[in-house]
Amino acid sequence: MYELKTQKTDASVLKYISSLENEKRKSDSFKLINIIKKVTNEMLKLWGTSIIGYGSMKYTNSTKKEFEWFKFGFSPRKNALTLYVTAYSEYIYQIADSNGLKHGKGCIYIKDIEKIDEKVIEEMINYSLER
C-alpha cells in the first residue's frame, strides 16, 4: 500500500486544540467537534500534526495508489476552519455556495462557524460519511 505523509496518530486531539493560540479557531473547533459527535459515533483522531479526522477508509487516488484516510475531517487553519469532505461533489459545492462558503477540491472553508446553520454542517458530514 502507498505510504502517505499524513498518517493517523495517537496524539491527543483535545490537547492539540487546546494548544491553539487563535481563540476563535479554538472555540470553533470545539463547537465543530460537538456537531460531529451528534452526527457520528466515529472516533476522532489526529492525522499528521493538524488534521482531525473521523472514521477510517481505504482511499484510492487518481494515480491508483491506495492508502488509509479519514471519512470526514477538519483542520483549524489560520484563516478558516478547513473541512475535508471525502465525498466532494456538486451537491457539497451547492451547499457551500448557498451558504456563502468558499471551497476547493474536497475542502470547504468556514471563517465563522456561528454564521453557519448547524443543520448545514450536519448535512455535509452525513453526506460525506454515507459515501
Image: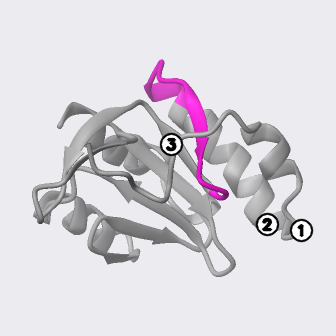
Regarding residue 32, the answer to whether it shows in the image is yes
Three-letter residue code for mark 2 = Lys
Q: Does residue 47 show up magenta in the picture?
A: yes
Tell me, yes or no, whether the two marked residues, 3 and 2, touch with CB atoms within 8 Å. no
The residue indicated by pointer 3 is 53
Residue 82: x %, y % from top left: 51, 66
In the image, residue 70 above or below residue 110: above
- Position of 26 with respect to 52 (left or right) is right
What quarter of the picture does the N terminus occupy? Answer: top left
Q: Which mark is residue 24?
A: 2
- The location of residue 60, given as percent across then percent down, is 17, 50
Secondary structure category for the residue under label 1: loop
In the depicted structure, whether residue 52 falls above or below residue 42: below
Q: Residues within 10 Å of mark 3 (few under 14, many from 20)?
A: many
* Whole-percent x, y for residue 46 in the image: 62, 43
Q: Nearer the viewer, residue 52 or 24?
A: 52
In terms of secondary structure, where does tag 3 sit?
strand
Tell me which amino acid carries mark 3: Gly
Instruction: Point out which mark residue 21 bears.
Output: 1
Measured as percent of width and height from the top left, residue 64 is found at 10, 56
Alpha carbon separation for disc pair 3 and 1: 21 Å
For the residues marked 3 and 2, what is the alpha-carbon distance in whole angstroms? 20 Å
Which residue is more in the foreground, 21 or 69? 69
Q: Is residue 37 left or right of residue 17?
A: left
Residue at 40% from the left image edge and 74% from the top image edge = 101
Which residue is at 44% across, 27% downward? 39
Which residues make up the magenta segment? 37-50
Which quarter of the rendered picture does the C terminus lie within? top left
